């Protein structure tokens, strides 16, 4: 019997209120939450005076690059970064090498994760134009990932005739990267020869995003199919969903689409390049409002690391993507301290709502019987994002130099301390997530 007692924390309760009190965990589960818990014979006690206890972050969109691209990141380095950032569970994307498009590839990832991951894990199965049998039977998986655009090779499923059979058969969640590939290719021709990375936001423009989101919603409506729209980036999409989103459709936004915009190209060049691209500042405002209003349901990072050498190749040869798991929680908690939202809203967007959308049992709340995946954060002190502090293998952040609060002090996975006071416990291993 393994017990852990967290004392004197500001505990976020399921009703969104805070309790100054204690939490007792046993064998990986939350056993008791109370204003005071008497336990004198415990050796595992954390004094959380002055700290806030939140449910561990569930990041529902990451690219951890293993297998095949481990020079950028691997499951061990990525989950060290997760632990430091308060991320206790993740859902990972299929564009590895080989692609995660078969049961065998999914099994391989699950085996690798069991050996290497410091936090809990789940994996998407990737759609191709011709792997429908695998999409129907692959298990366990959080859902089907479709690249409608911004992809190449087997994972690109861009035409309605290819998409429709996937929506028509089966019942599991479909998550789409919604960009119109035909429009992107046409715009690439129009703007070919331009090497300023800011052109990326014009090539993969707002119309490309809106076209694909409309098509995905059309097919979702036709078949009443559970749909999730990944990394919403434009105000026009948000306003379209405000008027047209049925209750079986969810959407997410990344911190970078809330907090960065096209002005970042002048400051950090290709480090600001991602898919879908950063947008104009007006889009930040509309996306924030959609998140506050519930049009957007939750937050993901789309952690997609590339090396600085790769980013230095110059546009258009530089790859799209940026890391995010280490900074997402303090970024959002800093916004809460600025008054843009509440701490309880951040916890809902980054944990509770994700668990609900993906039907992950016993996660996302601090409640007896739930899994003891928790993070203690310091909401009173600020410190900057420093390159030398990062655990991600790529070794950089688009938010370098930003002064943030809400940095994790202790991260707990399954009742075990995986990160505390700047040190990682690399002996901890997460578990495969279940999807009901």
Image (cartoon, grey):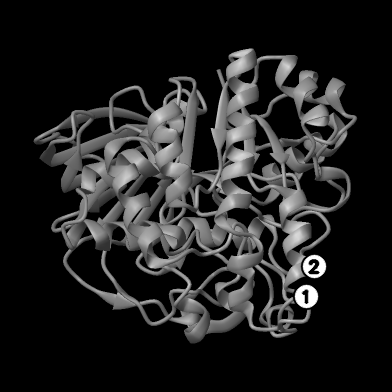
* Quarter occupied by the N terminus: top left
Q: Is residue 417 visible?
A: no
Q: Relative to the observer, which residue lies in front, 191 or 44?
A: 191
Residue assigned mark 1 = 192
Cα separation between marks 1 and 2: 5 Å
Give the answer, above or below, for where 254 lies relative to 259: above
Q: Which mark is residue 189?
A: 2
The image quarter in which residue 136 lies: top right
Identified at 63% across, 15% down, the residue is 222
- Residue 364 placement, left or right of 199: left
Identified at 54% across, 70% down, the residue is 391
Q: Relative to the observer, which residue lies in front, 373 or 150?
A: 150
Q: Are marks 1 and 2 in contact (CB under 8 Å)?
A: yes
Q: Is residue 222 visible?
A: yes
- Give coordinates of residue 37: x percent, y percent: 14, 34
Which type of secondary structure does the marked residue at label 2 adopt? helix
- Give coordinates of residue 44: x percent, y percent: 31, 47
Identified at 88% across, 50% down, the residue is 153
Give the answer, above or below, for where 190 lies relative to 25: below
Number of other residues with Cα within 10 Å of mark 2, as a class: few under 14, some 14 to 19, many 20 or more = few
* Quarter occupied by the C terminus: top right
């Amino acid at each position: 019997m393994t017990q852990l007692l967290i004392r004197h924390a500001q505990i976020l309760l399921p009703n969104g209120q805070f309790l100054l009190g204690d939490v007792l965990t046993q064998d990986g589960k939350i056993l008791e939450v109370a204003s005071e818990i008497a336990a004198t014979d415990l050796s595992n006690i954390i004094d959380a005076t002055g700290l806030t206890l939140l449910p561990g972050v569930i990041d529902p969109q990451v690219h951890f690059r293993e297998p095949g691209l481990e020079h950028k990141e691997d499951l061990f380095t990525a989950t060290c970064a997760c632990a430091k950032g308060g991320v206790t569970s993740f859902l990972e994307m299929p564009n590895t090498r080989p692609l995660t498009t078969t049961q065998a590839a999914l099994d391989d990832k699950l085996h690798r994760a069991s050996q290497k991951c410091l936090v809990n894990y789940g994996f998407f199965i990737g759609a191709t134009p011709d792997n429908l049998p695998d999409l129907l039977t692959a298990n366990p998986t959080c859902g089907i990932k479709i690249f409608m655009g911004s992809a190449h090779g087997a994972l690109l499923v861009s035409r309605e005739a290819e998409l429709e059979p996937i929506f028509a058969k089966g019942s599991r969640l479909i998550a789409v990267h919604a960009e119109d590939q035909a429009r992107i290719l046409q715009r690439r021709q129009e703007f070919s020869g331009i090497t300023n990375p800011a052109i990326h936001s014009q090539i993969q423009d707002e119309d490309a995003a809106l076209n694909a989101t409309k098509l995905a919603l059309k097919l979702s409506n036709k078949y009443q199919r559970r749909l999730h729209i990944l990394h919403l980036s434009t105000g026009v999409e948000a306003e379209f969903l405000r008027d047209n989103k049925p209750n079986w459709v969810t959407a997410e936004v990344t911190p970078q689409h809330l907090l960065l915009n096209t002005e970042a190209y002048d400051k950090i060049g290709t480090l600001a390049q991602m898919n879908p691209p950063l947008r104009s500042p007006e889009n930040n405002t509309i996306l924030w409002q959609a998140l506050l209003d519930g049009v957007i349901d939750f937050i993901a990072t789309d952690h997609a690391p590339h090396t600085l050498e790769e980013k230095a190749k110059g546009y258009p040869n530089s790859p799209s993507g940026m890391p995010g798991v280490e900074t997402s929680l303090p970024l959002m908690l800093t916004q809460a301290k600025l008054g843009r939202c509440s701490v309880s809203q951040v916890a809902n967007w980054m944990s509770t709502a994700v668990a609900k959308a993906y039907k992950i049992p016993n996660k996302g709340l601090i409640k007896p019987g739930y899994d003891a995946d928790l993070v203690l954060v310091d909401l009173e002190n600020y410190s900057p994002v420093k390159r030398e502090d990062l655990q991600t293998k790529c070794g950089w952040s688009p938010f370098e130099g930003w002064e943030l609060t809400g940095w994790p002090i202790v991260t707990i996975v399954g009742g075990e301390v995986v990160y505390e006071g700047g040190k990682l416990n690399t002996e901890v291993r997460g578990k495969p997530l279940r999807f009901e």
